[in-house]
Amino acid sequence: MGIWQEFLNLMLNVMVGLYQFLGGNFIVALVTFTVLMRVLMLPINLRQQRSSIKMQQMQPQVQAIQKKYKNDQAKMMEEFNKIGYNPADSLLGCLPLLIQMPIFFGLYRVINIMLQGTPLALLDMKFRLWEVFDLASLLPIDNTFLWVNLAQPDPFLVLPILVAGTMFLQQKLMMPAKDDSKAAKKGAEDDNPAAQMQQSMLYTMPLMFGFFAMSFGSGLAIYFIISNIIGIGQGYIVRRNLAEERALADVKREESKRLASKYENGDTSEAEDAESDIESLKANENGSGNTQKSKNGSSKNSSKSKKKKKKGKK
Amino acid sequence: MKNISFLKNSILNKPFFTIMLFGMVILLSACSGARQAGSWPSVSATDSHVYVTFSTDVVSLDVDNQEEAWRFAGEGRVEFYSPPLVVPEEETVYLADFGRNGSLLTGGGLIVSMYALEDGTTNPPNTRWVKEDVTDGRIVAGLHLDEDVIFTGSSNNRIIAVSRSTGELIWEATTENAIWSAPAKLGDTVYVTSIDRNIYALDAADGSEKWTHTLNGAGAGSAVLSADGERVYAGSFGNEIIALSAADGSDIWKAQASDWVWGAPVEVDGILVYGDISGNVFAVDAATGSSLWQASVNESIVGDIVVDGDTILVASGNVETQVGHITAFSTAGDELWDTKTTAHIQTSPVVMGDSNRAVLVYGDIDNDIALGVDVVDTSDGSIIWTWTLAEAEAAQ
């Protein structure tokens, strides 16, 4: 049996287990399963959000390097390495979605199998379940919820619209917060490929998943809606908690712009000096990152003192 | 390095990325209307012809001449699960499909159709009528024809009666879960088992409930009426078979199996024979339910048990090993012959009238087994003819 089949069997048995232990309610089992999936995905989502902020703050400097070394890829990469920038990180924004794809396809199969859309699915389920479960006593698995048959698409299109709407809100919250300063807007929105990608995904992903929900069983649409609502809540909390890091990012972006202008002017010696400043900023970020939740004021103060230090250097 | 540069300069370029994503959306939405689900094959037969449905194909085979008669595809590459209902006297084949998802333009939802095809010489056959809005649930169950009414059930918890001549809905009755079994009818009563663990007795004229009886487990096989019309038999996933009074649904007897009883039993010469998905075959006295004999065919029995004269035919299969068998027993329980089929069998064998032939159909999308048919001589189990869709298409 292949790894995909093993993965499917694991998901199916977890879902059936939840269904059995949570009073035989499919929706309750689905909600619990979705929360579990979200908790498992939390570290990746957080990493993606942090990476997004990091990309945002480095953009002015990155673009200056690109412009300066556009004909020398090796040198460009060398300079990228110096400032700790990896172009592949731009694609990190897609990672949570990519990781969710096997779960999505797996859950699609699991919902179809569990809701007995076909005799073949039920037969399949019987042979996939661990012996601890007595499938006959679990049948029939209730396939109705409100006005929908969970194994069939929603005839009134309410669920697909909710899928698209909640996904839009979630995507919106996943995006880095817009900075009020004009400079930050210019740097973050116009030139950052990761931000551009997220901007595109903000509209296309809800549309795509809305179409999916039109075709697939309502059980899967309900999974999307629950997942998105949890994602919205999670996004809100993460957004609030990362506010500190964003404040620091603002400072660093300004610093990055200053360095970028040095690159553009060809003042590499000062740029090298400034790189050591970046290192100290990174060290500061690591230090403040550990205490950011409990010491809201301290990181701001730390950022301000760094600003003053830079002004002094100038 | 050039690859990274390409990523930066083109893939992540905003217009390119946006166009790409919108392209994906359009492609996926276009495909979604024709999304296919897995199905298993079904078969019906007359003395000379075999009618199979599998995935998106409905094929008629002329067994006497060992050739394909016609092929039919439903609306929008829809799949078929339900076996065809063949009425040779009027040269008509009735079908019900598994439903297709409506596209964005049609407002989504599920579109389930029923068809009446002219079983003549044209290929593909002419349609007498196609009805798209009979029910909003996928049809897996077989069809039962009685005079001018076709009875069937849907996965959307409905038992329906439609007009034979137009496909118009006459009545529908609601159950608590899906119907996968073909209804049976005696007199003015329709008997249907449901996955909701109930057997329903409904008035054939208007679908009103006469009685219901709760089984020990879900019911996927058809209810079967005794020869004298006194009893109705139904197997269940509760590892038993039950005989009820056809008149009022009261218990007459129960008999055990060692696993789920999926397919319908058969009554022959006063004995009732049924199988379970562990591959056991049981024979009990039809009047009392007392055990007469037991045998094993080793592989899962999912289809109905059938008889050809006094010969009991049992089809079995194992999805993992892809081994299938058809085994014949006498009414005394002696194994008469056993034949290995081309692939594993998940459906019922069908006897071809009085021709001493039975047909078995196989096909498994998950395991890349194309649609195929074995025609077996029921007197000795020899395979008379094997037809496969793959070979037929290769020959064209």
Image (spheres, rainbow, N blue to C red):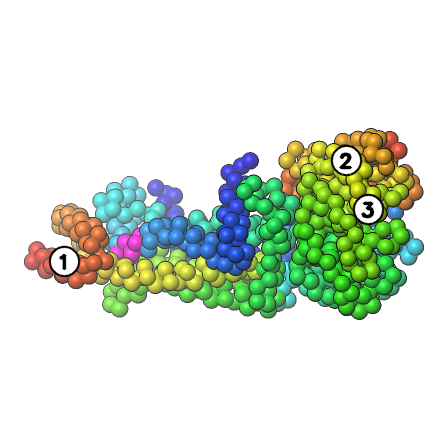
Question: Where, quadrant-wise, is the N terminus of chain B in this rendering?
Answer: top left
At numbered mark 1, what does the secondary structure look like: helix, strand or loop?
A: helix
Q: Is residue A190 magenta?
A: no
**Residues at marks 2 and 1, CA–CA distance in whole angstroms:** 84 Å
Q: Is residue A280 left or right of residue B216?
A: left
Q: Nearer the viewer, residue B225 or B32?
A: B225
Badge number at residue B288: 3
Which residue corresponds to the image point at 89% horizontal and 33% vertical from the top-left?
A: B379
Q: Position of residue B174 (x, y in %)?
A: 70, 65
Q: Could you say which disc has been placed on residue B294 in the image?
A: 2
Do the residues under discs 1 and 3 have CB atoms within 8 angstroms? no
Is disc 2 on the same chain as disc 3? yes
Q: Nearer the viewer, mark 3 or mark 2?
A: 3
Q: On the image, numbered disc 1 is attached to which residue?
A: A302
Label 3 Cα neighbours within 10 Å, binned few <14 / some 14-19 / many ≥20: few
Mark 2 surroundings within 10 Å by alpha-carbon count, few (fewer than 14), some (14 through 19), many (20 or more): some
Would residue B63 be seen by someone viewing this image from the given angle?
A: no
Main SS, magenta residues = helix
Q: For residue A51: magenta? A: yes
